[in-house]
Every structure is written in structure tokens, then in C-alpha cells.
Image (cartoon, grey):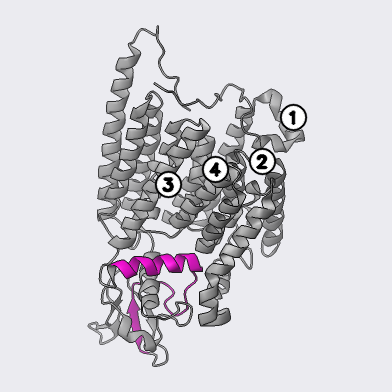
Amino acid sequence: MFPRPLQCGDGIDVGEDRRVRIVLVSVLLLASTLLTGYTVHNFDAFESERTPLLVGTGLLWLLFVLTLLVLRGVRGKAVVVLVLVGSVAIGGAAMVGPPNTSTDSARYAWDGIVQNAGISPYAYAPTDERLDDLRPEWLFQEPVINQRGDAVCPGERIQRAYKDPSGDLFCSALNRSDVPTIYPPASEIFFAGVRAITGPTPQYWPLQLTGLLLSVGTTIMLLAGMARRGINLRNAAVWAWCPLVATEAITNSHIDMLGVIFTLAAVFLVSAGRQWRGGIMLGIAIATKLIPVIAAPAMLRNRGWKVIIASIVTFALLYVPYVLATGISVLGYLPGYLSEEGYQDGSRFALVALVAPGEAAIVVAGALLAFIAVLVFLKTDQASPWVGQLVMIGSTLLILSPRYPWYALLLLPFIALSGRWEWLMVPLALTLRLLVPSLEVTQVSIALATIVIVVVSVRRAGLGATITLLRHPGRWFTPGQPVTGAASAPIERNEAR
């Protein structure tokens, strides 16, 4: 995919070529920044016509790939500067408008406001009239009377429900406002902390700002971790400049971003032999959104019992205050959510359902995930588990095929650490699924992503090694093994100059 950097003797001054590439990368990052701001400010998925947002998102992905290609010729400190500047600039541009693909951050704000009033977010649904005194106007609006004399909710992102117990029309920016919150305790502590600082009045920017800080923090963590492990620092741009990060971690402020940074901290700690600390970080990550649990198998082979114990204890301790306040209600809307999303009847599995329709899809999907988890557990090198985690997380997303691309935020750091660019097809396919909500389009995009990943992975291994890999699949997860084949190249080490 990437062109060979120019070398001395190619007829062009290498230093001059690198300066040209630095300028070109800077121009492309500026274009990405401006287009990000323009898209966020002008387009959103709440409008009936999603084509402008789809086109803008497609252009951002094209710019992203092109910028990564040009970055290949840049060396030294310029790489770090460009990666960091791009992360801050693109992320800052993502704050210029309100959320454009999701209303989740409105619920985050409300959960924080409720907690700071001394009420458990698991105790009452937002429609409960006992919470009337807490409602800020920007989240809750009064119904209006239309020309026919009917009460309606105004605005594109305002959703309707009915108050409990009066049954009056209830208009809010929250989704699922008639059920308690779904989010685990680490998320709720985070929501309360943000609103404790800002109060209930500011609208979306506080969570967007924290999303930006977490995103840039992840960029810095990746750069530091890569430098210590001799991984090419250019790979950090996969996270820092990715349109998915700007849109879903910052514009839409998804709490998955908090889970990402704690998962990455856990991975670096465990790979350095600090299992207890890594387990604590993993426990916090799981208590943020549950999804980071799929990063665990690659960290458990070497004294994994320490990681398991530390994560379980941390997870339980975070739940204690909420269990004492609310009891079993801390489960919130999680059971209902799984049913609503089609995971209890198998209808959500886009590709698996083609060969195993209905509830059989659950069995097939579960068997596939269990097999992959065992393989990753047995074969991943604990000192550098990136490829194992990449395969575990990416395969889970392909098999479950969620409607929400922000779940793929967890995958991006491991694409960066492993250098396996082909897995970018997963967040791209899930983004397409959100913007074009068609089962056929979803099946084609996920199938295409799967094919690209398999083909490129086989070519990375080379024809001669493919038979060996089929016989001993664990070698897919062995880092540091020389990569051969026409379409592959060894991962470049950092350069001191």
C-alpha cells in the first residue's frame, strides 16, 4: 500500500523530498481540519437527507489515507510534531458543532446532573416527574401546539415520550428517556465529575472538550509506548488523524473514548510485566462500557490470574456505591438494550445470519468468538500482544456487526501498534452502516472488509508460510516474526536522527 521512501542515489535529494513531504502533510492536515469543521458545523444525521454527511465523511477518509501515504517519507522529530498537531487541530475542529450522529452525550449530561443532585442514575427514568426540578432547558423543551391543535415536540433531535405517572407529553434531547440509564459505574463517575465542574447549564462542549483531551492523551500514550518498544512512530497517526476519532470521540463525545485510554494503559502495563496495575486499568475500562472485556484474552497467558483478580475487584468496587443506593436496578436498561438491538434473537448478526438465521446465529457467533478468544489466549506473546488484541477486537466487531461505529474506537490503537492497516476496513464498514442503514449495504461492506483483511493477511505471510499458518494458526499472533511476501515489508524501527 505504501510507496518506498526515496533513497540516496535515486536522482532526487532525499532531504529536499522530506521537506516537501512535511509541507504536503501539513497542507493535507489543514484540509482535513477545515473539512472536519465544515462537516460537523453543517451536516448531521438528524436531517432527513444524509447524503451531504455521507459525502463529507467519505472525503475525510480519503484525505486520511492520502495523508498517511505521504507521511511515509517523513523522518525524525517532524513525525511526532505532525502527529500531535494533527491530533489537536482535527480534534479541535470536531468541536465546532453539536453531536451529529448520536444523542448519547445528552444522556451523559443528564446522568451527571442527576448524580450531582444526590440521586442514583439507575433509580429513575428521565420521564419521572420527581426529577422535574432538575431539568435544564437545553435538554428538555416544552411541547408546542401545531396548527391542528396537537401537542408536538419541536426540533430535529428532540424526542417524545410521556411523563410518569401523569402521561403528559415529554420532549427531550435524550434517547430512551422512559428507561433508566444503561451505563456502568466508571462512566457515571465520569459524567458526574464533568458536570460537577461545569454545572448543568453548558450544553455539549464540556464533554466534547474532555473527548478532545482524552483523544490527544491517547495519541501521546501511543507515541510514548511506541518509542519505548521500537515501533514506528508514524503508526500513531492511524489513531491521531482518523475521522472516526474526531467524529465519535469528540463531536459525539462517546464514553467509549474513556474505555479506550484505560484499555491502552492496561495493555502497556501488562506487556511490561505489571499485571496488577494493568488489571486495575482493565477493570476501570470494563466498568466504563463493558466492551473492553474483549481485549482481555491477549493479556492473560502470563500470570493472567493477577489481571483477572485485579480487574474483577476494581469492577466490583466501582459498583459498590451504586448497588448500595439502588440495588439490582444498577443493571439499568442493559437487558432491554440487548433485546432491542437484536442480539437475543440473532437478527443483528449481518453476515452470520446469512448462513445461520434466527437464534442459530447466536450459537454460531458465540462459537466463533470462543474459538478466537482461546486461540488468542494460547498464542499471543504477552510482551507485545497488539496483533492478538487486534484480531480479537476486530473479529468481534465483524461477527457482531453493531450499528454503531464508535465501538470501533477500541480497535484503532491496536491497528496503530500492529501496523496492520487492512483492519481500518472495519471502522469504515461500520461507519457506512450508520450512514446508510441498509441490511444489504451492511452485508456487502462487512463482507468486503473481511475479504480485504484475509487477503492482505495471507499476502503478508507469503505463500510459503500460508500452509504453516493454516496448520499452526497461532503464528498469526507471534510478533517480531519477519514478514515476507510481495505485499509486505518489515515494520520499520524508529530513527534517532
Which residue shows up at 25% across the image and 85% down it? 148
Q: Quadrant of the C terminus?
A: top left
Locate residue 253, reporting x and y percent: 37, 58
Decide which of 310, 221 is in the foreground and name it. 310
Within-10-Å neighbours for mark 4: few <14, some 14–19, many 20+: many
Decide which of 376, 360 is in the foreground and name it. 376
Viewer-nearest of labels 1 and 3? Answer: 3
Q: Earlier in the sequence, mark 4 or mark 2?
A: 2
Name the residue beneath numbered marker 1: 468
Q: Quadrant of residue 219?
A: top left
Name the residue beneath numbered marker 3: 218
- Up-down: is 418 above or below 75? below
Q: Earlier in the sequence, mark 1 or mark 2?
A: 2
Name the residue beneath numbered marker 2: 380
Which residue shows up at 63% across the image and 47% down it? 299
Q: Is residue 49 visible?
A: no
Work out how far the residue at label 1 is from the one at label 3, CA to CA, in angstroms: 36 Å
| Residue 98 in the figure: left or right of residue 223 | left
Decide which of 198, 19 is in the foreground and name it. 198
The residue type indicated by label 2 comes to Thr
Viewer-nearest of labels 4 and 2? Answer: 2
